[in-house]
Image (spheres, rainbow, N blue to C red):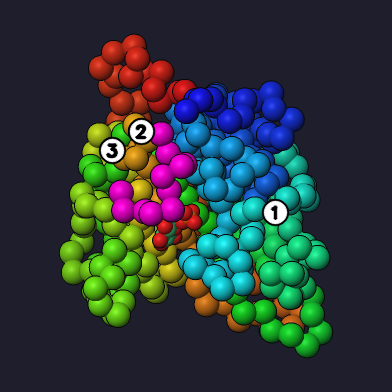
């Protein structure tokens, strides 16, 4: 199979947010997808080298939008149409007086979205690139005079790690979840009973009613990926290991190179003529603020390319 990198910085489809100091974000209008986020040059998102942006069956990585439905959907494809359609720029990119870079994208209902889901809406994604974090705000407007919008929404992350089997999750103790790997039973709720658990095995879990924070600890990367969230109580945690719909999207060496997570709200009722909003901040923390120690020259470029 021919290998290529799907997009370069010069590609006209890429909107580049540049904070200086080699801290950047690359965004495309297809699905308002964030396909790269670098802090001081170091890539934080996984984006498969097999991805073809024109073909959603071969598109794997970055941060994409789940809207208006999470998981399998009888009216359209998995996770809804939000990540497939072309969005517009509402504002930016612009730099504020702290040096942070802002970009706002918008999706308005149109005949294609209505053919899947017959409602009027406006969906806005605000991206703020900060020194070591990314703030993502979601806004949904219901312009209808009489119809309530009933939807599910999330940001669908592919977080780059050296090996997902060496990652643990903290901050979800006592919460209920559905184990989607264990299909032997009728998906009953289970309870997370430890402060921290490893992603050593293929995993696909949906956790409900979580608090404002949780984090991943990637031991091999020597980093903590910390989430703070507001009005986004639900989340999923998954790795590629067991996914059946993924084979054409990952190269041989990419299966363990990311942790998947969705941060969202899986039950929103938005009355006519009202607005819903939520936000999340993803921050990369290191014990010692410098980058990890590289075994050799090739290791160094592995993080950059
Ligand atoms: O392949 P997709 O549509 O991007 O979905 C990836 C994963 O997304 C997660 O949200 C689901 O819990 C998984 O079951 C799913 O496989």
Q: Pinpoint residue 90: horizontal percent, then vertical percent.
A: 78, 50
For the point 73% across and 50% down, the residue is 86
Write down which quadrant ligand 1 falls in: bottom left
Please state which of residues 288 and 62 is positioned toward the viewer in this rendering.
62
Q: What secondary structure is found at the residue carrying circle 3?
A: loop
Mark 1 packing: few (<14 Cα in 10 Å), some, or many (20+)? few
- Residue 234, placed above or below residue 25: below
Q: Where, by quadrant of the figure, is residue 53 drawn?
A: top right
Residue 83 left/right relative to 195: right
The magenta-colored residue range is: 241-251
Residue 130 left/right relative to 261: right
Mark 2 packing: few (<14 Cα in 10 Å), some, or many (20+)? few
Looking at the image, how many numbered discs can be counted on the residues? 3
Q: Pinpoint residue 273: horizontal percent, then vertical percent.
A: 77, 80
Give me the C-alpha separation between circle 1 and circle 2: 29 Å
Q: Nearer the viewer, mark 1 or mark 2?
A: 2
In the current view of this chain or complex, which residue is farthest to the bottom?
146
- Residue 234, placed above or below residue 134: below
Question: Circle 1 sits on which residue?
Answer: 85
Question: Circle 2 sits on which residue?
Answer: 252
Residue 278 magenta-highlighted: no
Question: Circle 3 sits on which residue?
Answer: 163
Q: What secondary structure is found at the residue carrying circle 2?
A: loop
């Amino acid at each position: 199979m021919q290998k290529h990198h799907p997009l370069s910085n010069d590609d006209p489809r890429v909107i580049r947010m540049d904070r200086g100091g080699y801290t950047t974000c690359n965004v495309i209008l297809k699905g308002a997808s964030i396909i790269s986020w670098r802090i001081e040059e170091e890539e934080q998102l996984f984006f498969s080298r097999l991805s073809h942006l024109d073909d959603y069956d071969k598109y794997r990585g970055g941060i994409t939008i789940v809207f208006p439905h999470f998981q399998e959907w009888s009216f359209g494809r998995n996770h809804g149409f939000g990540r497939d359609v072309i969005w517009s720029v509402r504002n930016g990119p612009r730099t504020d007086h702290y040096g942070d870079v802002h970009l706002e994208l918008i999706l308005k209902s149109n005949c294609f979205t209505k053919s899947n889901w017959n409602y009027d809406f406006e969906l806005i994604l605000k991206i703020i690139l900060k020194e070591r974090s990314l703030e993502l705000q979601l806004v949904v407007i219901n312009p209808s005079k009489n119809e309530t919008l009933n939807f599910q929404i999330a940001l669908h992350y592919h977080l780059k790690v050296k090996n997902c089997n060496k990652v643990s999750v903290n901050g979800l103790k006592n919460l209920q979840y559905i184990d989607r790997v264990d299909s032997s039973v009728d998906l009953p709720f289970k309870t997370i009973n430890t402060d921290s658990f490893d992603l050593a095995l293929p995993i696909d879990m949906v956790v409900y009613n979580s608090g404002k924070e949780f984090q991943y600890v990637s031991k091999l990367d020597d980093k903590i990926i910390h989430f703070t969230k507001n009005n986004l109580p639900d989340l999923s945690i998954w790795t590629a290991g067991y996914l059946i719909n993924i084979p054409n999207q990952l190269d041989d060496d990419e299966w363990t190179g990311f942790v998947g997570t969705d941060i969202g709200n899986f039950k929103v009722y938005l009355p006519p003529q009202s607005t819903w909003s939520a936000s999340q901040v993803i921050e990369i923390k290191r014990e010692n603020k410098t980058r990890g120690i590289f075994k050799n020259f090739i290791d160094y470029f592995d993080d950059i390319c």
